[in-house]
Amino acid sequence: MTQDIVDLQARVARLEKIITEREVNDLIARAIALGRITTHARAFYEDVGHQENGFEKLKDFFLKQPVIIPVPGVPSAVAANPFLTDCEKNLCRQLGITEEQYLAKTGRNG
């Protein structure tokens, strides 16, 4: 019975590793496709993704990472988003401009 538990734990660990690898690879592929990272940096991000909490760290980083490589036919997430963040709304108040003016100036006319 104890050996069955050990075998089952090992199997679960292998499956978790496979799932994590797929999630990390899919996340990196998406970041490359969206122009957020270069293909040359793939190995670095794969290493980060396989560290403890690496997937969550990458996901958080990629969500904050701006588009650094324009991809034809793929609008940047910022350009495609007609909604302002709290930070952008605060900036509008400080500058004394409307949200619509900000969106127009940044090319995000929604």
Image (spheres, rainbow, N blue to C red):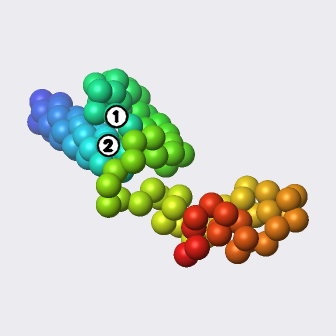
Above or below — where is 10 with respect to 97? Answer: above
| Badge 1 amino acid | Thr
Cβ–Cβ under 8 Å for marks 2 and 1 = yes
**Crowd rating for badge 2 (residues with CA inside 10 Å; few <14, some 14–19, many 20+):** many
Residue 47's spot in the image, x, y percent?
A: 32, 24
Q: Nearer the viewer, residue 71 or 50?
A: 71
The residue under the point 25% across, 40% down is 25
| Residue 82 visible here | yes
Left of 44 or right of it: where is 106? right
User: From mark 2 to mark 1, how far is it between C-alphas?
Assistant: 6 Å
Quarter occupied by the N terminus:
top left
Residue 102's spot in the image, x, y percent?
A: 71, 65
- Which residue has dot 2 on it? 32
Left of 96 or right of it: where is 88? left
| Badge 2 amino acid | Ile
How many marks the image carries: the answer is 2
Label 2 secondary element: helix
Q: Which quadrant would residue 86 be assigned to in this image?
A: bottom right
- Which residue has dot 1 on it? 38
The residue under the point 50% across, 43% down is 65
Label 1 secondary element: loop
